[in-house]
Amino acid sequence: KVRDAQPNFAKLSQLNNGLLCHITAHGKIFDCVSRSFAPKIGIDEDPVCGSAHCHIAPLWARRLDKADISAYQASSRGGELLCRMLPDNRMILAGKAVLYSVAELAI
């Protein structure tokens, strides 16, 4: 199960595959269930990762032959995303968001 996976973050941080690593599976309630990890940049697990679903949703859109994908990120916080594949291969994401940082531009 995706929810029960216990990744080795030290090994993940040594992989030569970019900054993000995902696990995903077909869901029972949602089209797909996933978790996303980024230990190379100090984030063992992202609670709900929009950019991850720009990778994950196209895979499920092709497999399920549908443009609209319902997704659940099964982190400890968890979150639901609605993902729509557009004909030009762009992705529209929707879901509830949590503000976690505010910054000011220093000029």
Image (cartoon, rainbow, N blue to C red):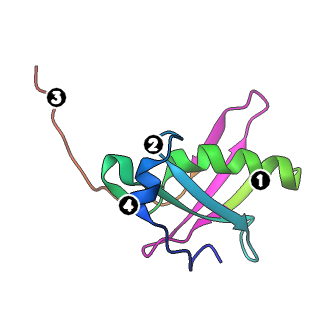
Residue under numbered circle 4: 44
Q: Secondary structure at mark 2?
A: loop
The answer to whether one can see residue 97 in this image is no
Whole-angstrom CA distance, mark 3 to mark 4, is: 27 Å
Query: Which image quadrant for residue 55?
Result: top right
The answer to whether mark 1 and mark 4 are in CB contact below 8 A is: no
Query: Counting residues from the N terminus, which is met first, the one under dot 3 or under dot 4?
Result: 4
Who comes first in sequence, dot 2 or dot 1? Answer: 2
State the image coordinates of residue 15 (x, y, percent, origin top left): 49, 47
Q: Residue at x 76, y 77 (%)?
A: 28
**Foreground residue among 92 and 2:** 2
Of helix, strand and loop, which one carries label 3?
loop
Q: Look at the image and give the residue range highlighted in magenta.
A: 71-93
Q: Amino acid at mark 3?
A: Leu
Question: Can see residue 11?
Answer: yes
Q: CA distance from mark 2 to mark 1?
A: 21 Å
Counting from the top left corner in percent of width and height, residue 73 is at 55, 66
Mark 4 falls on what kind of element? strand
Q: Looking at the picture, how far across and down is residue 67, in whole percent?
A: 80, 47
Residue 60 numbered mark, or none = 1
Q: Nearer the viewer, mark 1 or mark 3?
A: 1
Looking at the image, which residue is at 15% across and 35% down?
104
Residue 105 marker: 3
Q: Residue furthest right?
A: 65
Per the image, the residue denoted by label 2 is 19
Residue 9 counted in the magenta span: no
**Alpha-carbon neighbours of circle 1 within 10 Å: few (<14), some, or many (≥20)?**
many
**In the picture shown, does residue 73 fall above or below 38?**
below
Query: Quarter of the image holding residue 97?
Result: bottom left
**Number of numbered callouts drawn:** 4
**Closer to us: mark 2 or mark 1?**
2
